[in-house]
Image (cartoon, rainbow, N blue to C red):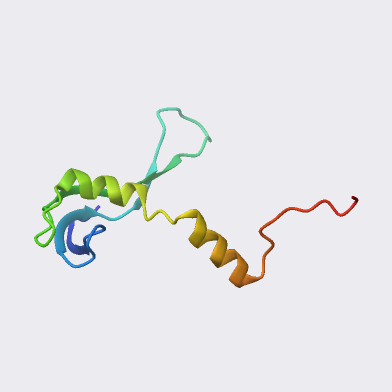
Amino acid sequence: MIKQRISLKCPFCNKGEIEADYIPPSVRFKKGTWGGSKPGVIRSEETLFLRIDKCPSCGKSDKEILKARERGKQVSHEERLKRLQASGLPTKIVNKRE
């Protein structure tokens, strides 16, 4: 696990560069306490942000930025429908037996 210093775009204004300390995901092999021929366990460690500075352009705090990154970018229902219609998928369920 190597700690890296990265720069991110602000999820609110998409202008500010935010400096963050970050540990990339890693996989570790862990041997169990049991003996014999049983294999060990592979553990996967998640991405972890240790410290984030506040946004220089919009001034959002580090807690708000972390919540927005965990939640992800939410798309409205209308945008989702437009994307489905553009790809040719049906947006209404119709019973053809009637």
Residue at (46% x, 39% y) in the render: 40
In x, y percent, where is residue 94? 78, 53
Residue at (40% x, 28% y) in the render: 33
Residue at (21% x, 56% y) in the render: 2
Question: With 80 as the anchor, is 56 left or right in this view?
Answer: left
Q: Is residue 47 visible?
A: no
Give above or below for 9 relative to 39.
below
Q: Is residue 21 visible?
A: yes
Find residue 16 and report its image quarter. bottom left
* Residue at the extreme right of the image, as rendered: 97
Find residue 32 and report its image quarter. top left
Residue at (33% x, 53% y) in the render: 25
Question: With 84 as the anchor, is 28 left or right in this view?
Answer: left
In x, y percent, where is residue 6? 18, 63
Decide which of 53, 48 is in the foreground and name it.
Answer: 53
Give above or below for 13 relative to 33.
below
* Residue at the extreme top of the image, as rendered: 34
Decide which of 20, 67 is in the foreground and name it.
Answer: 67
Give above or below for 47 relative to 15.
above
